Image (tube, rainbow, N blue to C red):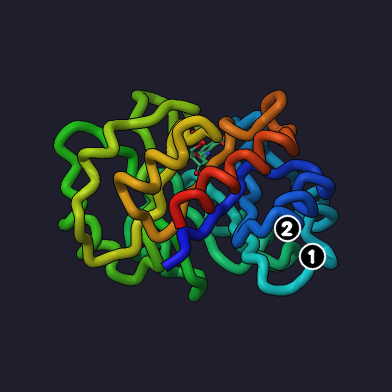
Amino acid sequence: MRTRVKFCGITRREDALQAVRLGADAIGLVFYSESPRAVSPQQAYQIVRELPPFVTVVGLFVNAAPGYLQQILERVPIDILQFHGEEPPEDCSHYGRAYIKAIRMAEGVDLPGLAQSYGSASALLLDTYQAGVPGGTGRAFDWGRVPKSLSKAVILAGGLTPENIAQAVKQVRPYAVDVSGGVERVKGVKDAAKMAAFMRGVDSVN
Ligand SMILES: O=C(O)c1ccccc1N[C@@H]1O[C@H](COP(=O)(O)O)[C@@H](O)[C@H]1O
C-alpha cells in the first residue's frame, strides 16, 4: 500500500495548493496559539475554501477547551481532528468526528496499551518526545522503537525531512507520514522545493 503524506502547519493558501499539486493526501492546520504555525479560524477558512476534493483537512489541537474546538468546527471544514496534548480517549471522541491521537515517544511508552485505550482513534501519530514541548520539535526519534505490528494504523512524524524520509518509510512502513518543519523555508512558510523532494523520497520507496 502507498504511504500517505500529510503536510502539517500550513498557514498560507499557496502552500496548501502546492501540497495538492504534489499529490499530498492531507494538510494540517494548527489551532494552538503557542505554535509559530498557529492559524486563526478566518485564516484557516481562507486556506481550505475551495480546495479540490479528496484532500483531507486535519485540525490540530493541544488540550483545547471544548467550546473553542466546537467553534472552529462550526467555521472551518475540518475532516479529521488531531489531538496533540494529554486528551483522554473520551475527550477525543466527544465531537463525533474521526480523530488521530498523537503519542510522544517518551521512554517506556506503552504503544500496544495506548492503541487499546484509544480504540476509537483512526490512527496513532508517533512523534518525538521533548519535555515541555507538545510537538513540532523538528527532531526525529529512534524509529527502531516502532513495533512491527500494532492494532492501529501508524502515522510517523517528528523531524522528517527530504533527506531522511526514504529511510524512515523503508524502516517503519507506516500507514502515513506527517511533516512540518522539515519542508519549511521559515517557521510557518513551506518551501515548494523541499515539499517536492519529500514527496519524491516517499515515492522512491512506494
Ligand atoms: O507544528 C507545531 O508547531 C506543533 C505544535 C504543537 C503540537 C504539534 C505541532 N506539530 C506537529 O508535530 C509533528 C512533528 O512536526 P515536525 O515535522 O517535527 O516539525 C507533526 O505532526 C506536526 O504537525
Q: State the residue at coordinates (39%, 47%).
A: 169
**Location of residue 70 (image quadrant):** bottom right
Q: Amino acid at mark 2?
A: Val
**Location of residue 115 (image quadrant):** bottom left
Residue 24 screen position, x and y as percent: 63, 57
Residue 51: mark in rendering = 1
Q: Are marks 2 and 1 in contact (CB under 8 Å)?
A: yes
Q: Is 158 placed left or right of 114 in the picture?
A: right
Residue 135 seen in render = no
Residue 20: mark in rendering = 2
Along the polypeptide, which appears first: circle 2 or circle 1? 2
Q: Amino acid at mark 1?
A: Leu
Q: Secondary structure at mark 2?
A: helix
Q: State the residue at coordinates (62%, 51%).
A: 28
190 over 171 or under it: above or below:
above
**Camera-side residue of 16 and 38:** 16
Q: Secondary structure at mark 1?
A: loop
Image quarter hosting the N terminus: bottom left
Q: State the residue at coordinates (34%, 71%).
A: 120
Q: Is 156 placed left or right of 69 in the picture?
A: left
Residue 179: mark in rendering = none
